[in-house]
Amino acid sequence: MVTLLARFFARQATDTQENHQMTTEAMTPTPADDVLMRFLTVGGATVELRNDTTVKECSATIATCLGCGAVQTAEWATEIRLYSSRSYVIQDRTKGERNARDKANEHATACRAMPRPPSA
């Protein structure tokens, strides 16, 4: 009887280790050089911040949730209008990245989406 119980608990421990390993592999986002920072959502997915590279000069920071797929963009540009008909645009990268970070963190605290399974 003791041997049977020992086998049962040994089998359960092995199953738990295998399940934990599979879960960890599915949750780990792929390494990328262009990721500024990552946030962990309540459901265990990841929100990644990247600078917009679709234009020649970066002009926005993009937050992408790898769980639910939500995408939020924080523009760097601030348009200053003068009293006349003229206006000009200031590129403020620090402010744009800070706004994107705040949006990503806010999303991560509310998103309950679990990580998407790896594609087959």
Image (cartoon, rainbow, N blue to C red):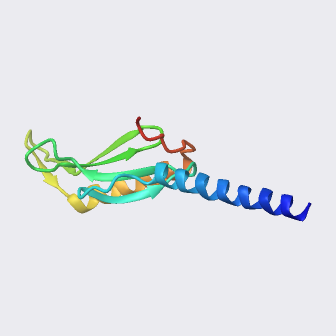
Observer able to see residue 99: yes
Q: Is residue 97 left or right of residue 22?
A: left
Q: Residue at x 79, y 56 (%)?
A: 8
Q: Quadrant of the C terminus?
A: top left
Q: Pick the residue in front: 112 or 87.
A: 112
Q: Residue at x 54, y 45 (%)?
A: 111
Q: Is residue 90 left or right of residue 36?
A: left
Q: Is residue 85 left or right of residue 30?
A: left
Dividing the picture into quadrants, the one containing residue 81 is top left
User: Relative to 36, is 63 above or below?
Assistant: above
In percent of width and height, residue 110 lies at 55, 47
In percent of width and height, residue 73 lies at 31, 44
Observer able to see residue 103: no
Q: Residue at x 66, y 53 (%)?
A: 15
Q: Is residue 55 left or right of residue 102?
A: left
Q: Quadrant of the N terminus?
A: bottom right
In percent of width and height, residue 69 lies at 42, 37
Q: Pick the residue in front: 39 or 120.
A: 120
User: Relative to 61, is 86 above or below?
Assistant: above
Q: Residue at x 15, y 50 (%)?
A: 58
In percent of width and height, residue 33 lies at 24, 58
